[in-house]
Image (cartoon, helix red, strand yellow):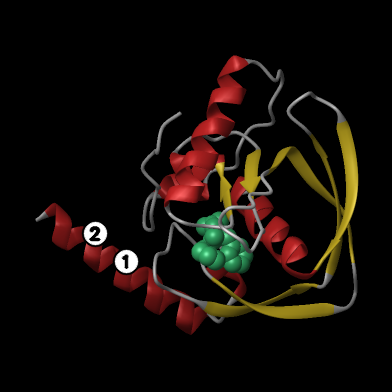
Amino acid sequence: MAVREIVKLPDNRLRLKSEPVKRIDSSIRKLVDDLFETMYDAPGIGLAAIQIGVPKRVITMDLSKKEDDHKPQVFINPEITWTSKETSKYEEGCLSIPEYYEEVERPAQVKVKYLDLDGKAHEIEASGLLATCLQHEIDHTDGVLFIDHISKLKRDRVIKKFAKAAKKVEA
Ligand code: K1U
Ligand code: ZN
């Protein structure tokens, strides 16, 4: 297991569409271990494989509140099969856009189908933080960031800020 570097804005890899997992083998199990290690270290409540530079449709999540009561969840090839008309707002953050938080409006409930680590297919109906986090992470697998759901003015401002910071590091 290893804590991997998190890919940050303005890295273009965040805009890649990730590939579906064809076979759940030892490389996928190692990827999942590294995602959890990196997510808990950050700390974060979710992480998509592209955020550690791996363009595969794999997501980890842990929405448990207590630090000593982990509830790790893995979603392989997750797909949204239904979204509610009702929406909800949540102030989202992203480990790839550190220290930036903004309210995002998304469908309040979603149905998601996915594979677990044994390759077993599941379909769940999610609401609350699980629905928000699933949509945020599935967006990552499609190269979409939460800032794509806010106003252009705010998005351009945050992109500019991170581009400027990256240039400073380069120089
Ligand atoms: O995908 C990511 O970058 C992870 C992100 C997930 C997320 C947060 C909020 C709404 C939707 C999706 C994070 O985990 S940001 C950090 C965070 O929310 C958090 C960190 C420590 C404790 C509690 C929350
Ligand atoms: Zn994110």
Using the image as rendered, state which of residue 42 and residue 52 is in the foreground: 42
Using the image as rendered, state which of residue 28 and residue 153 is in the foreground: 28
Q: Position of residue 105 (x, y in %)?
A: 70, 78
What amino acid type is highlighted by mark number 2?
Ala
Q: Residue furthest left?
A: 171
For the point 71% across and 66% down, which residue is it? 132
Task: Look at the picture and state if 34 lies above or below 159.
Answer: above
Is 8 on the left-hand or right-hand side of 111?
Answer: left
SS at badge 2 = helix
SS at badge 1 = helix
Mark 2 residue's CB less than 8 Å from ligand 2: no
Is 50 on the left-hand or right-hand side of 7?
Answer: right
What amino acid type is highlighted by mark number 1?
Phe
Q: Dot 2: within a 10 Å radius of its alpha carbon, few (fewer than 14), some, or many (20 or more) residues?
A: some
Q: Dot 1: within a 10 Å radius of its alpha carbon, few (fewer than 14), some, or many (20 or more) residues?
A: some
Task: Look at the picture and state if 29 lies above or below 121.
Answer: above
Which label sits on residue 80? none
How far apart, in angstroms, are the residues tagged by discs 1 and 2? Answer: 6 Å
Q: Quadrant of residue 24?
A: top right
Are circles 1 and 2 on residues that touch, CB within 8 Å?
A: yes
Q: Position of residue 85 (x, y in %)?
A: 90, 74
Is 123 on the left-hand or right-hand side of 171?
Answer: right
Q: Position of residue 100 (x, y in %)?
A: 43, 74
Q: Which residue is mark 1?
A: 162
For the point 23% across and 67% down, which residue is it? 164
Task: Look at the picture and state if 143 lies above or below 36.
Answer: below
Q: Position of residue 166 (x, y in %)?
A: 24, 59
For the point 89% across and 39% down, which residue is it? 122
Q: Which residue is mark 2?
A: 166
Q: Quadrant of residue 136?
A: bottom right
